[in-house]
Amino acid sequence: APSLQAAARAPDGLIEAFHLPAAPAFTWAVQWHPEWRVMANNFSVALFATFGEAARARATRRQ
């Protein structure tokens, strides 16, 4: 789909993560377990940080 943007690829070119930049909410999909050894993977750290920010922003809007 044109609105999907690949964000991570394996060495063989397989898309391992994508997101919808224009989505009104946090919208990411990943092809691995980002919680596994999270501190060893900078992308996973950033993914969780961004998710936390989105969750806090949504909670603030809902109050």
Image (tube, grey):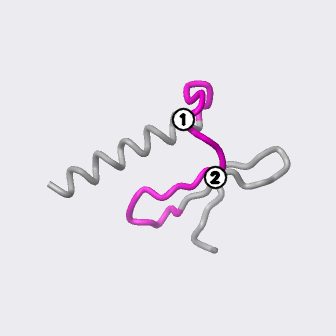
Residue 50 as seen in the image, left or right of residue 45: left
Is 29 included in the stretch rendered in magenta? yes
Position of the N terminus, as image quadrant, is: bottom right
**Residue 48 place in picture, x, y as percent:** 47, 39
User: Is residue 28 inside the magenta stretch?
Assistant: yes
- Closer to the chain start, of discs 1 and 2, is 2
Q: Which mark is residue 35?
A: 1
The residue positioned 77% from the left and 46% from the top of the image is 10
Residue shown at 59% from the left, 38% from the top: 43
Please identify the quadrant where the C terminus is shown: bottom left
The answer to the question of whether label 1 and label 2 lie on touching residues, with beta carbons closer than 8 A, is: no
Predominant SS of the magenta segment: loop
Tally the numbered discs: 2
Outermost residue on the left side: it is 63
Write down the residue under mark 2.
17
Q: Find numbered disc 1 in the image and state the secondary structure of the residue it sits on.
A: loop
Q: Residue furthest right?
A: 12
Circle 2: is it few (<14), some (14-19), or many (20+) Cα within 10 Å?
some
Position of residue 60 measured from the top left corner of the image (x, y, whole percent): 20, 50
User: Which label lies toward us, 1 or 2?
Assistant: 1
Q: Amino acid at mark 1?
A: Glu
Secondary structure beneath disc 2?
A: strand
Question: Which residue is pictured at 61% across the width and 25% down the height?
Answer: 40
- 12 in relation to 22, above or below: above
The residue under label 2 is which amino acid type? Ala
- Give left or right: position of 56 versus 46: left
Category of crowding for the residue at label 1, using alpha-carbon neighbours closer than 10 angstroms: few (below 14), some (14–19), many (at least 20): few
Q: Which residues lie in the magenta part?
A: 20-42
Report which quarter residue 36 is drawn in.
top right
Considering only vertical position in the picture, is 43 above or below 26? Answer: above
